[in-house]
Image (tube, rainbow, N blue to C red):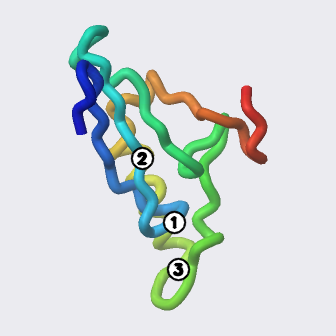
Amino acid sequence: MRLGNVEIAAVATPGHALAHHAYVVADHTRSDEPWFVLTGDALLVGDAGRPDLHVCGELTVEGMARALYRSLTADVGPVRSRRRRARRPGGVDP
């Protein structure tokens, strides 16, 4: 989605929850490179979301943990130097 100079791309990042998404934001007045990523509860300050909370049916904790690892290293990894959490674990704003 593009809003003026800002482009937002949804990226499927399963692992914490199967249907989880992150949103990569680029401000083209700054650079064509991504500026930041909104990761929700998949990536926390110094931690990652728990893969065991949404396990059901054929899903396993190990399978969700592997999916979370792939999501954070391959899908959002290219912008990892700019990752920040909008809030700290427990919902406390920085």
Looking at the image, the residue that sits furthest to the front is 4
Where residue 61 sits, quadrant-wise, is bottom right
- In what element is the residue under mark 2? strand
Q: Residue at x 48, y 81 (%)?
A: 59
Are the residues tagged 2 and 3 within 8 Å (C-beta)? no
Q: Position of residue 54 (x, y in %)?
A: 58, 73
Q: Please say if 73 is above or below 20.
A: above
Could you classify mark 3 by the number of other residues whose Cα lies within 10 Å: few (under 14), some (14-19), or many (20 or more)?
some
**In the image, is 74 to the left or to the right of 1?**
right
Could you classify mark 2 by the number of other residues whose Cα lies within 10 Å: few (under 14), some (14-19), or many (20 or more)?
many
Q: Residue at x 29, y 24 (%)?
A: 6
The label shown at residue 37 is: none
Q: Amino acid at mark 2?
A: Ala
- In what element is the residue under mark 1? loop
Q: Residue at x 26, y 9 (%)?
A: 29
The residue pinned by badge 3 equals 60
The quadrant of the picture occupied by the C terminus is top right
- In what element is the residue under mark 3? loop
The label shown at residue 22 is: 2
Q: Please say if 3 is above or below 70.
A: above
Residues at marks 2 and 3, CA–CA distance in whole angstroms: 22 Å
Camera-side mark, 2 or 3: 2
Looking at the image, the residue that sits furthest to the top is 30
**In the image, is 8 to the left or to the right of 36?**
left
Q: Position of residue 68 (x, y in %)?
A: 47, 57
The residue pinned by badge 1 equals 17
Query: Of residues 84 and 80, which is closer to you in this image?
Result: 84
Q: Amino acid at mark 3?
A: Thr
Q: Position of residue 67 (x, y in %)?
A: 42, 62
Q: Earlier in the sequence, mark 2 or mark 3?
A: 2
Residues at marks 2 and 1, CA–CA distance in whole angstroms: 12 Å
